[in-house]
Amino acid sequence: MRTLRTGTDLVQVSRIAESLENFGEKFMRRLFTEHEIGYAMSSEALRAERFAKRFATVGLDWRQIEVQLNRI
């Protein structure tokens, strides 16, 4: 069964950018799915923002969920 939940969480994008710079691949692989990494890495200019958006989804094991762009 799929559950859809909504909420508001804030993440400081500069902290995510710093983690990406300091820990790189290890940081990404520990917290994000392959699809999320591929999407975030597809834009150098928006990379930190895209990872931050996904990082803000808290309360679960990081890879139990996947945040996807839904184009309606």
Image (cartoon, rainbow, N blue to C red):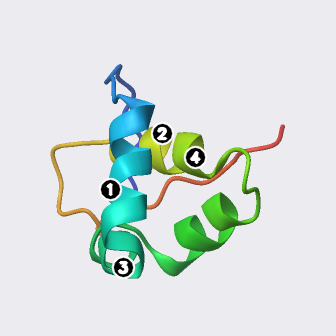
Residue at point 36%, 49% (across, down): 18
Please give the residue where the numbered disc 2 appears in the rendered image.
53
As drawn, the label of residue 50 is: 4
* Circle 2 crowding by C-alpha within 10 Å: few under 14, some 14–19, many from 20: some
Q: Determine whether the residue tagged by mark 2 lies in a helix, strand or loop.
A: helix
Q: Amino acid at mark 4?
A: Arg
Mark 1 or 2: in front is 1
* Circle 4 crowding by C-alpha within 10 Å: few under 14, some 14–19, many from 20: many
Say left or right for 25 vs 43.
left
Spatial separation of the CA atoms under disc 2 and disc 4: 5 Å
Residue at point 36%, 28% (across, down): 12
Badge 2 vs badge 4, beta-carbon distance below 8 Å: yes
Location of residue 29 by image quarter? bottom left
* Circle 1 crowding by C-alpha within 10 Å: few under 14, some 14–19, many from 20: some
Please give the residue where the numbered disc 1 appears in the rendered image.
19
Please give the residue where the numbered disc 3 appears in the rendered image.
29
Say left or right for 2 vs 68.
left
Badge 1 vs badge 2, beta-carbon distance below 8 Å: no
Q: Is residue 46 visible?
A: yes
Q: Amino acid at mark 2?
A: Lys
Going from the N terminus, do you reach mark 1 or mark 2 first? Answer: 1
**Front residue of 23 and 34:** 23
